[in-house]
Image: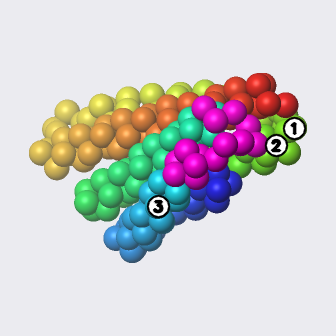
Amino acid sequence: MLLDQNAMLCKIAEQLHVMLDGDPRSYEVNKSIAEIEADADKLHRQISRTLYQSFITPIDREDILRINQDQEECIDGLQMMSTRIAVYEMSHFRFPAKKVAANIEEMAKLTTVMLQGLAKRHDVHKTRAFHMLRAECDTIVAVGVAECMDLPEDVKPLDLTDALKWVQIYDRLEIVLAKLTDLAEDIEEGVLKNV
């Protein structure tokens, strides 16, 4: 079930990447993400219910609970981000946001590999690759925010509004990155305890 939940996380990360890559169908992509998120909510509750009804679990109970909750928070963060982008009706998409979205998709895929390793009780050694992507994202987000603040001298109200929207989008990206990092660290902790 955790792998099914992770597949939903990866699908939403992929859809968000498509959205930030300038897909003109923002509302349709956002609707698709919302539908996946609703299914993920049901699975999150099912995992919790099954966990509380199980006497014996394949790995420590608290690890399952933490990974389940981390994945749910990542999915929620990505869905909130896609809603914000759709509502803002962005006229253009900045390169730093596109690059971070691509890295988020890649980071989600790494959590899949890490979870598969945990299921087989085998360390797949993806933590370093994950943290390298995270460090790159931190730098790119900082550059993106600085780019937003680099306004022309004859600034127009529309330029200010655009800058504010992008700063909020970068803020949401940082939140998602933090949640993904928590997920990767909790999977790694589960690997260390159970392998």
Q: Are marks 1 and 3 in contact (CB under 8 Å)?
A: no
**How far apart in space, not on screen, are marks 1 and 2 (Cα)?**
5 Å
Q: Which residue is mark 1?
A: 122
Q: Give the left or right position of residue 93, taking residue 13 as reference.
A: left
Residue displayed at 19% across by 41% down: 160
Q: Are marks 3 and 2 in contact (CB under 8 Å)?
A: no
Q: Is residue 41 above or below residue 187?
A: below
**How far apart in space, not on screen, are marks 1 and 3 (Cα)?**
29 Å
- Magenta region: 47-62
Q: Nearer the viewer, mark 1 or mark 3?
A: 3
Instruction: Return the residue nearer the eye: 49 or 169.
Output: 49
- Classify mark 1: helix, strand or loop: loop
> Residue type at mark 3?
Lys
Q: Are marks 1 and 2 in contact (CB under 8 Å)?
A: yes
Q: Is residue 174 above or below residue 89?
A: above
Q: Which residue is mark 3?
A: 42
Queried whether the magenta region covers residue 178, the answer comes back as no
The x, y position of residue 170, in whole percent, is 39, 39
- The mark that comes first in sequence, 1 or 3, is 3
Q: Is residue 153 above or below residue 98?
A: above
> Residue type at mark 2?
Gly
Mark 1 Cα within 10 Å, few/some/many (few <14, many 20+)?
some
Residue displayed at 50% across by 35% down: 179
Mark 3 Cα within 10 Å, few/some/many (few <14, many 20+)?
few
Query: On residue 117, which mark appears?
Result: 2
- Classify mark 3: helix, strand or loop: helix
Residue displayed at 67% across by 43% down: 55
Q: How is the image coloured?
A: rainbow
